[in-house]
């Protein structure tokens, strides 16, 4: 499997986001009372990234960045992240969450090759039995490194002083 278009996000949805309106570039919560944005058990903050994959309107699915968290008067807002070379092979590794941490999701290959964000229905498929040791290089400190067009990301694997090996 080709992982040349591998991106990392902080969390991924496990359910549709509650009461959002979309303009193809943002998802805005329109419920009252305004609520914290909690995805897979993680309360999100500004600049956190999300793979939205469970919307009933699948044209809203995709990768987003939190640009506004709710306060007394304003809702949370997620802004779509535009990924260069976005296509059927674009793959996401999830860095955190109570149930989806370390999971890898890829676009459903039945999605048309010409994707227009906000128009094309985007479906994601969980990759199972994937050995990430050959995908992501490990450092001597036991961190996995993910490099993408958005950021360079390190997240710890194992415990301090643990010797890591691949099988």
Image (cartoon, rainbow, N blue to C red):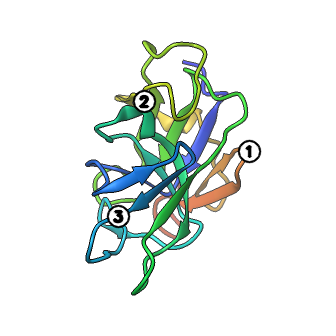
Which label number is shown at residue 149? 1
Residue 41's disc is none
Residues 11 and 156: in front is 11
Sequence-first disc among 2 and 1: 2
Horizontal arrangement in the rendering, residue 141 relative to residue 97 (left or right): right
In terms of secondary structure, where does tag 2 sit?
Answer: loop
In contact (CB < 8 Å): disc 1 and disc 3? no
- Secondary element at image label 1: loop
Question: Residue at point 46% right, 16% down?
Answer: 111
Can residue 64 be seen here? The reply is: yes
Label 2, on which residue? 130
Residue found at x 42% / y 30%: 130
Q: Earlier in the sequence, mark 3 or mark 2?
A: 3
Q: CA distance from mark 3 to mark 2?
A: 38 Å
The residue to which callout 3 is attached is 30
Q: Nearer the viewer, mark 2 or mark 1?
A: 1
- From this view, report whether residue 113 is shown above or below residue 99: above
Quarter of the rendering containing residue 114: top right
């Amino acid at each position: 499997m080709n992982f040349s278009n591998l991106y990392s996000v902080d969390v991924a949805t496990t359910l549709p986001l509650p009461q959002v309106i979309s303009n193809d570039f943002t998802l805005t919560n329109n419920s009252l009372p305004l609520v914290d944005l909690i995805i897979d058990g993680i309360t999100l903050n500004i600049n956190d990234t999300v793979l939205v994959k469970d919307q009933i309107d699948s044209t809203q699915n995709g990768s987003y960045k939190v640009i506004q968290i709710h306060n007394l008067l304003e809702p949370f807002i997620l802004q779509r992240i535009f990924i260069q070379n976005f296509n059927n092979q674009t793959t996401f590794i999830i860095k955190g969450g109570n149930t989806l941490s370390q999971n890898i999701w890829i676009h459903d290959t039945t999605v048309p090759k010409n994707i227009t964000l906000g128009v094309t229905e985007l479906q994601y498929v969980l990759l199972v039995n994937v050995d990430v040791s050959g995908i992501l290089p490990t450092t001597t400190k036991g961190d996995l490194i993910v490099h993408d067009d958005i950021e360079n990301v390190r997240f710890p694997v194992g415990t301090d002083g643990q010797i890591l090996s691949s099988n």
